[in-house]
Amino acid sequence: THTSDEQNHLVIAKLLLPTDDAQFDASKYDTEKGEFGGFGSITGKIDVEIKMNHEGEVNRARYMPQNPVLLATKSPNSEVFIFDYTKHPSVPNPADNVCKPQLRLRGHTKEGYGLSWNPNLPGHLLSASDDMTVCLWDVQAATAQSSFLDAKTIFNGHNAVVED
């Protein structure tokens, strides 16, 4: 989301939805509309569990199916970020607005939105971009000493922006 020059965050939240047998308050019945309540009468609840600083808006976020603590994100810059949310505090230090992903994936020259983990090959991630390319990374090939990983393969051939 656009935060008007405030710090952007990648947020992990728990959504609690009302059950089917939730009790409706008869005093909230709107006879004109034929419905109960309105905005916010019987609602779910969103609990923010972890909030991590993010560089720019989060264009897309996806968790790795084989290891859900690993999250890939796309932002307005050309990099793809990999976060291990177990390595971040629940709330970032307000004095430190630095985005600290575990890994920065390089290969694109523009932002994008397409992002998908391979459900069959752990660590394999595809990303599509406005630069008309698709990049493939194997994040398991990253070394602990490096905070950057270059694309394993860059697929060219599109003559327009590559979306989802």
Image (spheres, grey):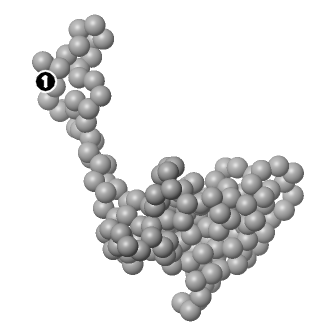
Q: What residue type is labelled 1?
A: Asp
Crowd tier of the residue under label 1, counting other residues whose Cα lies within 10 Å: few below 14, some 14–19, many 20 or above = few
For the point 70% across and 49% down, which residue is it? Answer: 163
Up/down of 24 relative to 105, above or below: above
For the point 49% across and 65% down, which residue is it? Answer: 54
**Left or right side of 156 for 77:** left
**Left or right side of 83 for 41:** left
Q: Residue 25 location in percent, x, y?
A: 13, 24
Please name the residue that numbered disc 1 is placed on: 25
For this orientation, the residue located farthest to the top is 32
Q: Residue 36 location in percent, x, y?
A: 23, 20
Answer whether residue 100 is visible to the viewer in this image.
yes
Count the numbered circles shown: 1
Q: What element carries label 1?
A: loop
For the point 30% across and 61% down, which residue is it? Answer: 49
Q: Residue 94 location in percent, x, y?
A: 36, 69
Answer whether residue 128 is visible to the viewer in this image.
no
**Left or right side of 94 for 72:** right
Q: Residue 81 location in percent, x, y?
A: 57, 69
Quadrant housing residue 34: top left
Up/down of 145 relative to 149, above or below: below
Up/down of 54 relative to 130, above or below: below
For this orientation, the residue located farthest to the bottom is 145
For the point 56% across and 78% down, which residue is it? Answer: 103
